[in-house]
């Protein structure tokens, strides 16, 4: 069985999409950039040999770029915070019998298909793979099996506790690999990088 790729898609109201960016440039422009990021995420994943699981924040849609491909599974995100939603998504996908599952968001313009392929390859020999983001968060998380105890607090998307999570992984005797540090799109500097890639 091939590995599985979880993609979180934020399709709720404009005001809630990329909040920090919206504060800087306005909700309409922030939404336009986020749609651009969705297309980028589709382009780097649509030809993947891995099974794709899309998890939507607010209603499953058949009006996005993934629908035409007909090769993805669609679900609603379930949970009160990011940590719960991630755990529930991993649980659902691992329950299908996969031995490699990777999670990504849809806001990292520097993420390429080679990073995802490398992450799956790392899981041949390591328990966990992480793609660290420049802001101290992460853009990718992969596991060779479900390590539910790593999701005991709402800490995966906070900068100070991200390093603590790495220490927790080591304390559990688990192995991990790190990908390149990349930038996601949350502020004007990262928007500039996005603009100059077009």
Image: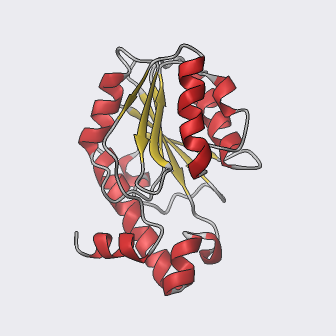
Instruction: Tell me the quarter of the picture where residue 18 sits.
Output: bottom right
> Which x, y percent locates residue 144?
47, 19
Q: Residue, x 23% and y 74% (percent of image)?
A: 196
Q: Residue, x 54% and y 18% (percent of image)?
A: 145
Is residue 28 toward the left or the right of residue 161 in the image? left
Asked if residue 22 shows in the view, the reply is yes
62 up-or-down from 79: above or below: below
> Which x, y percent locates residue 105?
48, 50
Instruction: Tell me the quarter of the picture where residue 20 sits.
Output: bottom right
57 up-or-down from 6: above or below: below
120 up-or-down from 99: above or below: below
Asked if residue 96 shows in the view, the reply is no
Is residue 68 toward the left or the right of residue 26 in the image? left
> Which x, y percent locates residue 152?
73, 32
Q: Residue, x 40% and y 55% (percent of image)?
A: 134
Q: Nearer the viewer, residue 96 or 105?
A: 105
């Amino acid at each position: 069985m091939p590995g599985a790729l979880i993609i979180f898609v934020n399709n709720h109201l404009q005001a809630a999409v990329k909040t920090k960016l919206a504060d800087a440039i306005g909700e309409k422009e922030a939404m336009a950039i986020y749609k651009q990021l969705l297309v980028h995420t589709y382009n780097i994943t649509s030809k993947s040999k891995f099974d794709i699981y899309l998890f939507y924040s607010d209603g499953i849609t058949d009006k996005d770029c993934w629908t035409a491909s007909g090769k993805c599974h669609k679900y609603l995100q379930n949970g009160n915070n990011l940590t719960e939603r991630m755990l529930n998504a991993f649980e659902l996908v691992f329950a299908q019998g996969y031995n490699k599952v990777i999670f990504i968001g849809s806001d990292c313009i520097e993420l390429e298909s080679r990073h995802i392929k490398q992450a799956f390859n790392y899981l041949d020999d390591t328990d966990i793979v992480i793609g660290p983001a420049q802001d101290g968060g992460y853009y990718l998380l992969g596991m060779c099996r479900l390590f539910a105890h790593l999701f005991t607090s709402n800490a995966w998307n906070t900068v100070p506790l991200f390093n603590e999570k790495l220490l927790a992984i080591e304390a559990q005797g688990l192995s991990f690999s790190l990908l390149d540090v990349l930038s996601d799109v949350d502020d004007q500097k990262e928007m500039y990088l996005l603009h100059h890639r077009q």
